[in-house]
Image: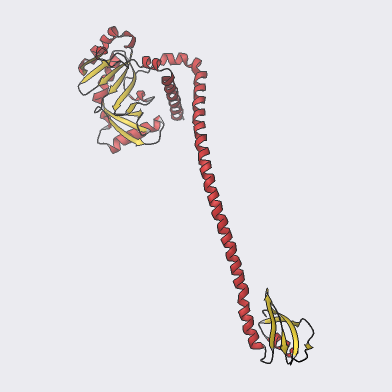
Amino acid sequence: MASHFSDFWLWWAGILGDLFSRFVPWRARRQSGFRLVISAETATLFCEETAVSSTKSQTFPLSLLSDRLAVLRTTCPAQSGIGTIRLEAGRFVLRQLSPLALPLSRLQSAAALDLSESTPFKAGQMLALPVTGAVNASCYAIVKNSVLVPVLSAFNASGVTVAGIEFEAAGEEIRIAHGGLRLVANRRTVGKSRLAIAFASLMVIAIGATVVHAYLRNDAAIGRLIADVETLGTDAKIARKALDQRAAAHAELMTLRGNIEDSRPVAVVWEELARVVPDTAYLTDFSIKSGQVTMAGYAEAAAELVVALEQSQGFSEVGFLAPVIKTPGVDGERFEISLDVGG
């Protein structure tokens, strides 16, 4: 629980720091103090963060760092109490762990595991520092103790607070993650006492800034959601049209199947009638609907025809629809018979 609270606090402080540096850049530059650029054998000291001209910088061997920090109190007293360390390329190795932004505690654990399991370096001789500003969200820098520890010791001996650690990389502004300085030996927190004093008075402003930040992120998320809903709505219309077409095709298929099933008894009825009806009888009308047959014609003995139909296992409910009559000039009796298909 403590680690979760610490991660939240560091995230919140980082958000406020980014807003502060964005809207009050001159104040942020002043609080970062001087800059010390570390190369392989030498160090270059800039009295101000943005002053990179030769008149305000000095290069000297690393062995003289403590002496130059002491002299800095007289040459640049306004900036001598706090400084930013910048490591040139080749003084560190950048490792990418994940494109997702991990909380600081998780990133520290993942960096320690990656350093021991996936690199040839010995953990006791290296520092694994979580960084921010790289292309991938979760990265860390591997720095030799022999590169960074002497610099930190010189800062500590001179009473200089480390404002931050930066890493030179082409096209990227990489710096140690907020809260990562606690992993470095002999660190001094930036403005610790002032932060404690000003915390109560800045709480309302901080909460307001957090709400604004959350609102902006929420507004952007709502915009993306609306776009996704519109896309899904179009896809839903296409899917609904496809389902309607499929339902229509299924209904047509069922109708066709029903017609086929209705047509199957016709052949059976004709075959059975051809067997049962004698040659002396013939039909003039014939219809079949829903398994019921109606037929009319002439026969020498219509009653015998009814008896023959009743004896057939293919028919049932055989009966006359009208009286049997004699038609002048026609041999035989005229009949109208109805029957059901099936025994």
Give the tally of numbered discs.
Answer: 0
Furthest residue toward front:
329
Toward the viewer: 55 or 278? 278
Apparent side of residue 133 relative to residue 336 in the rendered image (left or right): left
Q: Position of residue 26 (x, y in %)?
A: 39, 15
Furthest residue toward top:
74
Q: In the picture shown, does residue 48 fall above or below 109?
A: above
Q: Position of residue 9 (x, y in %)?
A: 45, 25
The residue sitting at 35% across, 28% down in the picture is 131
Residue 71's image quarter? top left
Residue 123's image quarter? top left
Toward the viewer: 315 or 39? 315
The residue sitting at 24% across, 24% down in the picture is 147
The residue sitting at 68% across, 82% down in the picture is 315
Apparent side of residue 257 relative to residue 54 in the rendered image (left or right): right
Toward the viewer: 129 or 223? 223
Q: Position of residue 112 (x, y in %)?
A: 33, 33
Q: Position of residue 187 (x, y in %)?
A: 33, 19
Toward the viewer: 105 or 326? 326
Name the image quarter holding the C terminus.
Answer: bottom right
Colouring style: secondary structure
